[in-house]
């Protein structure tokens, strides 16, 4: 990171980086996030190695599924499908995953899954916007598994509240693991494992903040550089004077099974 770069230089850089997919390699050297201890992508690969038909919901640009399939090779499911709702991500996932024989289906996040009942023995998802438990249970075969990493409550809220101010308790407690356990069980799934962790994040320059908020659009809805320029400038000066802006992400691992 070049500390001589101006606020305008950094903001322009953060605003210019493409946001498609879930490849976060651009942040190297400018932002860090601790990883959950369970190693989701590698663990998903181990599950794929034992599956016969698998579905990855909201695959983003397909990067996580691509890594997991690489871990699973050469023992991998006969059938692998993925869904994605945002057209640029769906196109990127198709290009990345087609060589692995994965069928990528464009499907809105809030729509029914476009697959038959009991089509899969493994359903995966990393950071779904909102899990549709009834649909997940429907497409799972009896004895099948839903294995996912979800975003937890109040994730990166230090940054969210810097821009939006204090958030109500109902917003802060959204995506709570206990609520998701209840939703899964109400759909007829049995919880095999549920683990949660709070993980340190650091933003080392304002370009990283701008790119993060453009990429993870639900953090500060409607975010634009123009709308938040005064707050961005103040945060840039704070980082320059005090060092990285520290926040904390929350994640939980959810392993659920459809009864025989």
Image (cartoon, grey):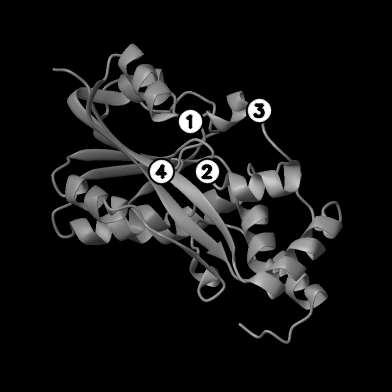
Identify the secondary structure beneath mark 2: loop
C-alpha span from label 3 to label 2 = 14 Å
Residue shown at 42% from the left, 22% from the top: 179
Badge 1: how crowded within 10 Å, few (<14), some, or many (20+)? many
Q: Is residue 128 left or right of residue 122?
A: right
The x, y position of residue 160, in whole percent, is 66, 45
Q: Earlier in the sequence, mark 3 or mark 2?
A: 2
Residue shown at 45% from the left, 42% from the top: 127
C-alpha span from label 4 to label 1 = 10 Å
The quadrant in which residue 138 appears is top left
Residue placed under numbered mark 3 in the picture? 168
C-alpha span from label 1 to label 2 = 9 Å
Identify the secondary structure beneath mark 4: strand
Residue contact at pointers 1 and 2, CB within 8 angstroms: yes
Badge 3: how crowded within 10 Å, few (<14), some, or many (20+)? few
Badge 2: how crowded within 10 Å, few (<14), some, or many (20+)? many
C-alpha span from label 1 to label 3 = 14 Å
Identify the secondary structure beneath mark 1: loop
Figure check: 162 above or below 245: above
Residue shown at 22% from the left, 60% from the top: 71
Residue placed under numbered mark 1 in the picture? 175
Residue placed under numbered mark 2 in the picture? 155
Asked if residue 126 shows in the view, the reply is no
Residue contact at pointers 2 and 4, CB within 8 angstroms: yes
The x, y position of residue 60, in whole percent, is 49, 49
Residue contact at pointers 1 and 3, CB within 8 angstroms: no
The x, y position of residue 218, in whole percent, is 63, 41
Badge 4: how crowded within 10 Å, few (<14), some, or many (20+)? many
Residue placed under numbered mark 4 in the picture? 251
């Amino acid at each position: 990171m070049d500390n001589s770069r101006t606020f305008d230089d950094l903001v322009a850089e953060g605003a210019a980086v493409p946001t498609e997919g879930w490849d976060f390699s651009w942040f190297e050297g400018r932002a860090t996030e601790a990883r959950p201890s369970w190693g989701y992508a590698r663990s998903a690969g181990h599950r794929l190695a034992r599956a016969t038909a698998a579905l990855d919901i909201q695959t983003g640009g397909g990067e996580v599924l691509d890594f997991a399939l690489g871990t699973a090779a050469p023992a991998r499911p006969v059938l692998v499908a993925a869904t994605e709702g945002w057209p640029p991500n769906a196109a990127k996932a198709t290009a990345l995953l087609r060589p692995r024989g994965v069928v990528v289906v464009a499907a809105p996040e809030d729509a029914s899954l476009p697959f038959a009942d009991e089509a899969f023995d493994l359903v995966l998802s990393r950071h779904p916007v909102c899990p549709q438990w009834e649909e997940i249970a429907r497409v799972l075969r009896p004895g099948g598994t839903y294995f996912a990493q979800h975003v937890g409550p109040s994730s990166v809220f230090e940054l969210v509240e810097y821009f939006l101010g204090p958030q109500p308790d109902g917003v802060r407690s959204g995506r709570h693991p206990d609520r998701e356990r209840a939703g899964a069980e109400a759909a007829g799934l049995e919880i095999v494992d549920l683990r949660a962790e709070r993980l340190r994040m650091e933003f080392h320059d304002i370009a990283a903040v701008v790119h993060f908020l453009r990429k993870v659009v639900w953090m500060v809805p409607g975010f634009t550089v123009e709308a938040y320029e005064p707050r961005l400038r103040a945060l840039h000066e704070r980082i320059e004077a005090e060092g990285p802006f520290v926040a904390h992400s929350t994640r939980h691992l959810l392993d659920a099974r459809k009864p025989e």
